[in-house]
Image: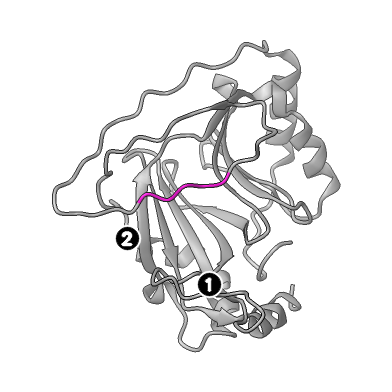
């Protein structure tokens, strides 16, 4: 299910047609994995976060490096003009909500969980044609595409697509406890993925039990392709009743 109403980028039909032609004509050879660039920084502690991946996937699994990446090279305020509707939507349920109320909870190296040949995922084009909202988000130069799986599916994923390289990289995946709903590009190298997730305090305090209600937090994943990092941010938590009320406004 899609989350709060978010800014939608208009799809360029010409680009979709070119992508379709590429998928038909390109070879089915599997792309080579991209070398990871070490990004250590002294003094920063980053808690590794293990994303749950589907056991039925036929994609080649990429092991995540244990090296700590550098702190984000881009500030959240840089994305503010591109996320005004998202901030307003959450702000209607969380008084005073804006990007400055988000807390960075993780920064990790940008390395795909799985890598496939793009031609093995050509069904996403058919899905896009059936929907009235975008699931493909193009960079300005149209060389890189962010794919977010459609709403209504039990699991959510975020992939980076590079048509010129016949490349499909899955970078984020989650089950019913969280979802990704939109993406905005700041430039050709940096973009943010919006979403939400169930909140589970680091203290171990339980949520979603018979006696403790579920709570949710808005989430933002900032991708920096140049710096090779993904940074995850979380906003203030809201209880399930407020969260579901917000979703009714889609």
How many numbered badges does the structure rendering display? 2
Label 2: element kind: loop
Q: Point out which mark residue 217 bears.
A: 1
Q: In the current view of this chain or complex, which residue is farthest to the front?
A: 210
Judged left or right of residue 33, residue 246 is: right
Task: Tell me the magenta residue range.
Answer: 48-52
| Image point (30%, 30%), residue name | 37
Task: Return the residue nearer the eye: 53 or 190.
Answer: 53
Can you say whether 168 is above or below 71 in the image? above
Q: In the current view of this chain or complex, which residue is farthest to the right?
A: 130
Can you say whether 158 is above or below 250 in the image? above
Q: Quadrant of residue 179?
A: bottom right
Quadrant of the snapshot with the C terminus: bottom right
* Among numbered discs 2 and 1, the one appearing first in the sequence: 2
Q: Residues within 10 Å of mark 1 (few under 14, many from 20)?
A: many
**According to the image, label 2 marks what residue?**
75
Q: Which SS does the magenta portion mostly show?
A: loop
Q: Residues within 10 Å of mark 2 (few under 14, many from 20)?
A: few
């Amino acid at each position: 299910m899609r989350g709060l109403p978010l800014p939608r980028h208009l799809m360029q039909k010409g680009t979709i047609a070119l992508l379709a032609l590429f998928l038909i004509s390109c070879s089915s050879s599997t792309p080579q994995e991209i070398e990871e660039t070490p990004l250590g920084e002294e003094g920063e502690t980053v808690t590794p976060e293990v994303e749950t991946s589907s056991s039925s996937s036929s994609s080649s699994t990429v092991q995540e490096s244990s090296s700590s990446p550098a702190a984000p090279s881009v500030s959240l305020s840089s994305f503010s003009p591109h996320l005004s509707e998202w901030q307003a939507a959450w702000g209607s349920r969380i008084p005073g909500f804006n990007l400055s109320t988000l807390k960075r909870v993780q920064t990790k190296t940008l390395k795909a969980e799985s890598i496939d040949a793009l031609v093995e995922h050509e069904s996403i084009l058919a899905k896009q044609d059936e929907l009235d909202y975008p699931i493909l988000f193009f960079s300005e130069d149209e060389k890189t595409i962010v794919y977010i799986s459609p709403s209504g599916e039990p699991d959510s994923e975020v992939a980076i697509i590079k048509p010129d390289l016949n490349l499909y990289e899955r970078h984020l995946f989650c089950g019913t406890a969280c979802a990704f709903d939109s993406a905005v590009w700041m430039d050709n190298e940096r973009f943010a993925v919006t979403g939400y997730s169930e909140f589970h305090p680091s203290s171990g305090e339980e949520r979603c039990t018979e006696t403790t209600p579920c709570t949710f937090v808005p989430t933002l994943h900032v991708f920096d392709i140049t710096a090779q990092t993904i940074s995850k941010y979380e906003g203030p938590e809201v209880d399930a009743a407020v969260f579901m009320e917000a979703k009714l406004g889609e």
